[in-house]
Image (cartoon, rainbow, N blue to C red):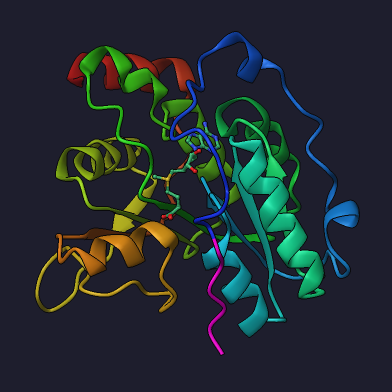
């Protein structure tokens, strides 16, 4: 049975500014032993997990994987964690943090081959050019993910806003660390490869709006140095 979470009765700010002083305070990201019953299982990381519908379902169906969702809006994390406890899921945790502040050192600390896939689904758009720095996928986070993901492991992104996915595509492809998956129809996937929709995905589908989905596989290329990568990225944006 697909679990459907009640989000309507939660009063939560629509956006928070990840660059505000409050969100620059790093948290001690829990160790694997504190997060999961069996810390040796492969991990899927969802960045911007919101109220958690996607991961609650994934973790219910795939008990041989561990799932971690990171989310900057605390009330959503509290509600998702409560739901997780009610479902008694010991292979899932939601962590309140700013992914751009507290996730990178955790990614670097992971045992080799442990992180198997990452998803970034419908990230906040931050349309104005001067706000692009608030977007969640930034050079240093991408490089930390590239370091943690070994060859053949996956990075999935989706958005209903072309400019947002294009920005992520550019950053990912600029790193040279990933190959984009191509179907017989082209570079965009018609379906979510995980087969479980997120809250935002359900909403976008219900409005009959377009969804842009791209799947990447980590290749054998070494992770570039952050300074030179940042210079290359700045020259293109
Ligand atoms: C538009 S929502 C999409 C949520 C969910 N992925 C979905 O598809 O339904 C984007 C989410 O990313 C979270 N977010 C934005 N910036 C973040 C950051 N720096 N660290 C962690 N979460 C962040 C937002 O609070 C929000 O819940």
Residue 171 shows in this picture: yes
Span of residues in magenta? 1-6
- Between 28 and 84, which is closer to the camera in this rendering? 84
- Left or right of 127, for residue 158: right
Residue at point 22%, 52% (across, down): 160
The residue most toward the left is 185
The residue most toward the bottom is 1
Residue 19 position within the rendered picture, expressed as x and y whole percent measured from the top left: 50, 15
Residue 57, picture quadrant: bottom right
- 44 in the magenta segment: no
Residue at point 15%, 60% (across, down): 209
Say if 231 sits above or below 41 in the image: above
- Left or right of 95, for residue 86: right
- Between 215 and 83, which is closer to the camera in this rendering? 83
Residue 10 position within the rendered picture, expressed as x and y whole percent measured from the top left: 57, 49
Residue 98, picture quadrant: top right
- Left or right of 31, for residue 158: left
Residue 212 position within the rendered picture, expressed as x and y whole percent measured from the top left: 21, 57
Residue at point 38%, 29% (across, down): 135
Q: Main secondary structure of the magenta part?
A: loop
Say if 76 sits above or below 74 in the image: below
């Amino acid at each position: 049975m697909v679990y459907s979470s009640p989000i309507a009765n939660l009063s939560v700010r629509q956006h928070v500014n990840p660059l505000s002083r409050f969100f620059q305070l790093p948290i001690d990201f829990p160790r694997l032993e504190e997060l999961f019953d069996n810390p040796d299982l492969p991990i899927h990381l969802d960045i911007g997990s919101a109220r958690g519908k996607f991961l609650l379902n994934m973790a219910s169906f795939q008990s041989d994987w561990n799932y971690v969702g990171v989310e900057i809006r605390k009330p959503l994390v509290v509600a998702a964690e409560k739901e997780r406890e009610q479902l008694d899921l010991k292979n899932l945790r939601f962590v309140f943090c700013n992914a751009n502040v507290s996730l990178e050192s955790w990614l670097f600390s992971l045992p080799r081959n442990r992180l198997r896939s990452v998803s970034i689904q419908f990230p906040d758009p931050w349309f104005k050019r001067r706000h692009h720095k608030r977007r969640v996928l930034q050079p240093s986070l991408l490089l930390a993910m590239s370091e943690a993901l070994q060859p053949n492991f996956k990075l999935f992104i989706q958005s209903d806003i072309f400019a947002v996915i294009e920005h992520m595509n550019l950053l990912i492809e600029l790193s040279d660390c990933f190959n984009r998956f191509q179907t017989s129809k082209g570079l965009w996937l018609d379906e979510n490869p995980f087969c479980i929709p997120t809250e935002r995905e359900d909403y976008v589908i219900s409005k009959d709006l377009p969804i842009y989905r791209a799947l990447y596989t980590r290749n054998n290329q070494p992770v570039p140095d952050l300074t030179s990568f940042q210079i290359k990225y700045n020259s293109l944006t």
